[in-house]
Image (spheres, rainbow, N blue to C red):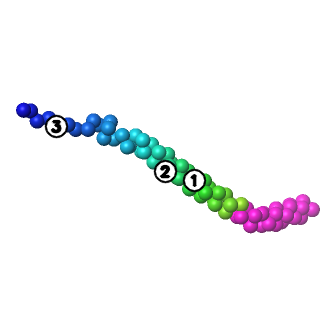
Amino acid sequence: MEATVTTAAPHARFGWLRTRGLRLIFFFAYALMVLMILEQGRIIHAQQMLIRQLYPDSVELSSARVRLNQQAHH
């Protein structure tokens, strides 16, 4: 009698990877995308606050430049 060894076919062994692996990859990609979008929102908000804080200084510097130019031409 011959002894036969049966092994599972490679596609059967990694069948769970095909069914669940793709879902896991999409889930992690989606989670990373959500985290990136949240971080971008936080950065945009911080930039808006910085612009609002710097705007009065910009207006003051512009008016000072205008006054200096007017004084230089008179």
Q: What amino acid does circle 3 point to?
A: Val
Of residues 9 and 37, the one nearer the viewer is 9
**Label 1 packing within 10 angstroms: few (<14), some (14-19), many (20+):** few
**Residue picked out by circle 3:** 5
Vertically, is 2 above or below 65?
A: above
Judge whether residue 57 is colored magenta. yes
Would residue 65 be seen by someone viewing this image from the given angle? no
Vertically, is 60 above or below 4?
A: below
Q: Is residue 37 left or right of residue 71?
A: left
Q: Is residue 40 left or right of residue 69?
A: left
Magenta: main secondary structure: helix
**Picture coordinates of residue 46 (x, y %)?**
67, 63
Vertically, is 43 above or below 4?
A: below
Highlighted magenta segment, given as a residue range: 49-74
Helix, strand or loop at label 2? It is helix
Q: What amino acid does circle 1 point to?
A: Val
Name the residue at 45% across, 43% down. 22
Name the residue at 36% across, 40% down. 15
**Residue picked out by circle 1:** 34
Nearer to us: label 3 or label 1: 3
Disc nearer the start of the sequence (1/2): 2
Quadrant of image for the C terminus? bottom right
